[in-house]
Each structure stands twice: as structure tokens, then as C-alpha cells.
Image: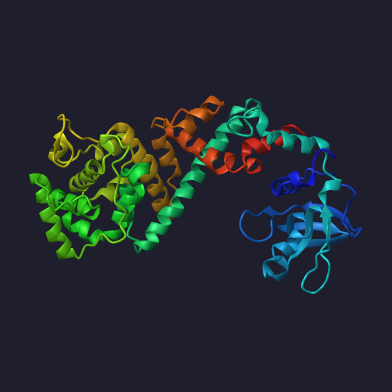
Amino acid sequence: MGFFYFRSMREDLLHFIWKYKKLPLQNLVTGQNEIVEIVDVGIHNHQSGPDFFNAKLKINGQLWAGNVEIHIKASDWYAHNHEKDVNYDNVILHVVWHDDVAVYRKDNTEIPTLALKSYVSDDLLKSYRDLFDHQSTKTINCENGISQIDEFTKTNWLERLYVERLEQKSIFIESLLKHSKNDWEKVLFCLLLRNFGLNKNGQSFLSIAQALEFSVCRKLLKKPLQLESVLMGLAGLLDDEGGLDPYYVTLQKEYGYLSKKFGLSSQGIQNPEFFKLRPSNFPTIRLSQIANLYEKHQDLFQKLMTTSHLDGIYAIFKISASTYWDDHFTFGKVSGKQKKNLTTPFIDLLIINTVLPLRFCYARHLGKDATHDIFSIIAKIKKEGNSVVKKMGALGFGVGTARESQAVLQLYKMYCMKNKCLQCAIGSNLLHGNI
């Protein structure tokens, strides 16, 4: 094992070795010369606290039940202040790579320590080193080994990753729900505005949604010009005192009246940007489209939560900006006449990033499981065409629909980019298969 330097060791490999028993199960001896027999490695804990819960071990013939903590060095126990944390009082074994110091409980009894460097094979260490050999890869760590992974493993993993992505998006939805005092319509409004703004103006549009009481929106749902004036006024798009465009002046007057009536304030709102945006994504167009979406569907939340077919959801989003914008992208500047409808690719993004995550979260609050219906809908949506999806597709991931494109985005951002290969079914499978 001489080639594998101490500084190359990572804690995730030690977790892998313990979890999958990648060490000889006979003749294990602690630093205190106690014989260890592994009855049950325990449950891997990915949150705070000991690394494995409810392990069962025989130490010198006596059965122990408790937790296992894993570190690179035994002295990390003190570096992480575990000796002061009651969550670590029930640790029955300290598993380390390098046993550099004795570790004691609060009652001054020594915790048995098992040093893995005496038991791990060279083959496993070499496979692990090869997995992280960036000199031979261009995109992700395992790109040279993906061809060894069977399609069943990849397909199952991508399904799990899509559900994981929904779970991750639920965290933000739950925060919106708490902030809105459980007003699901307000949550939808916030999500829609953020996603209408895309990457460039998403945060700006979200700040508008969060600053505007949805009770005001409810009063303006049948008045798209007034709702448009409120959205554009809060966005700072009606601040020019010298505006001569008649439609601009109309919106400005409406906003002046409504801002006084409802006590509206743009404080804390981030103004949207036009720079480097396609004209169809200008904030003027997108905010007008939002206003008309709510004018057409006063029961928008209920419709989006209950419409079961993709075509029905598309029909809900078949809306356009106000007629003024047919020949404008900005105020006062005439352009070629063209109805500013939502395009199918844009609607797809709204479904992927707003409708389906919200349905997932809402169903869970009702004690239901919407996974089957969500899978059915997203399987009919075309894959996204961003650079990550193209890269992962070229490496051998079957990306045919939006479900797979969402899954590979989750894989790339949450595992590949963070070197969490041993928490990934593919990296773990490669290490299993090469030793």
C-alpha cells in the first residue's frame, strides 16, 4: 500500500469500506488489542451525528450495540469537538485510517479504535485512485468507466436522481410556504415569477412576488392592465417621469393609484435587467404574460394541481402578452408585429421547474404520492438542451426526455462536481466491480 499516501485518503472511502465490508472480516484487532467481529455495520447517517447508527459488534466476545464514528485521523475526534457533544456518547467503535491518539468518553473510558490501513487491499486503493485520476478525464471522474455499467443500473439510478431533484426543489417550496403562511396560491405565484424570469431575472422577479401581497393580486385577477401596471411598477419599469408613450402613461397612472390604494412599496426589490437577453425574454414581455395568465385562469393553482394530461397543462399556458406588445418589446419603440405567445420550450421549463415540483410537494402535504403522475407527464416532455445534458449524453447516459435531463443535471451538479463518487450508484458500482 505504499503508493497510497496518507494525504490522499478521503473519509468517503472509509465510509465505503465500512459500509460494504471491504476489509477482511477475520482477525480484526483494535489499537488496544481487542478482537472485533462485525455483526452489523449499522445504518449510514448522512446528516449530523455519528456516521453509522445502531451497529452491532462483538469486542473481545462481548456484544455491543451503538454507533460508529469514522475519521481519517483518530485525533479528528478532538478537532471536531466530539468529546463535548452528547450525540457521540454512544459511540462503541472509532474507525480511522491513522490511529494517532487515544480517544476517551466523558467517563474516561477509552473508545476502541480500528485502524483500517492495516486491512485494506492495494487493489481497492488503486481502483479508488484511478477513479479520481483527473489527468485522464475531461468531464467527470468516471467517464472512462461508464461503459462498464449496465443499462439497468444507470436507468434505476437516473430514476432515483429525478426524485432526489424533486426533493431538493421541495426545500425551496417549503420555505416559500412557511413565509406565505401556508398560502399555496402565493407559493405558485412566487415560483412562476421566478421561473418566468429565467436565470437572468429570476431573483428579481421573485423579489417582486415576495414583496406583493397575494391578496392584492386576487383583487386584480380580472384586470390584467392593472396587474401588469403593478408588476411593472414594482419592477421599476415605470419610473421615467418624461414618458410620452400612451400605454406607458396609462400603466404609470394605474400604478400610481394602486400603489397608494394598497400601500405598495418597491423597497428591497431588485430591478430586472435587459442586457444580453433575447427580446422575447425582456422583463416587459414576461411580466405582461404573467398578468394575462392570471386574467385567463383565476383558479390557476387548482388547475395546475389537477390537470392530469400534458396537453391540458400546455393549454393552460397558451397565453400571450397584452396587445400593445404585439409590436413592441420595450416602451415607445415599435417593432415588427408578432404575437408574444409563450413558446412550447418555455412552457416545458415552467412545467419542469414550477408545476411538477409544486405538485410533488402539495401531494405530500395531502398525504399522497404524486410520483407516478409526475413521471407520466415528464416522460412526454422533450429533454433540455443545455451544455451539461449534451456532455452527459455524449458520455453514454440515455437522455431522451426531460426526466432524464433533470436526472443528469442532478447527477452532474450534486455528485460529479462535488466528487461524491462513492455516494453515486455508478462510482460505487465501478469500485465494487474493480476489486
- Residue 273 picture location, percent across and down: 30, 45
- Residue 364 picture location, percent across and down: 43, 53
Q: Residue furthest bottom?
A: 107
Q: Is residue 108 above or below residue 74?
A: below
Q: Which of the 4 image quadrants contains residue 261? A: bottom left
Residue at 51 percent of width and 35 percent of height: 408
Q: Which of the 4 image quadrants contains residue 198? A: top left
Q: Is residue 33 above or below residue 5?
A: below
Could you tell whether 386 is left or right of 419 in the image?
A: left
Q: Is residue 263 above or below residue 432?
A: below
- Residue 290 picture location, percent across and down: 24, 46
Residue at 90 percent of width and 49 percent of height: 27
Classify the position of the N terminus by image quarter. top right
Residue at 30 percent of width and 57 percent of height: 269
- Residue 147 picture location, percent across and down: 63, 25
The residue lying toward the viewer, choosing from 163 and 245, is 245
Can residue 423 be seen from the camera position used here? yes
Residue at 71 percent of width and 36 percent of height: 431
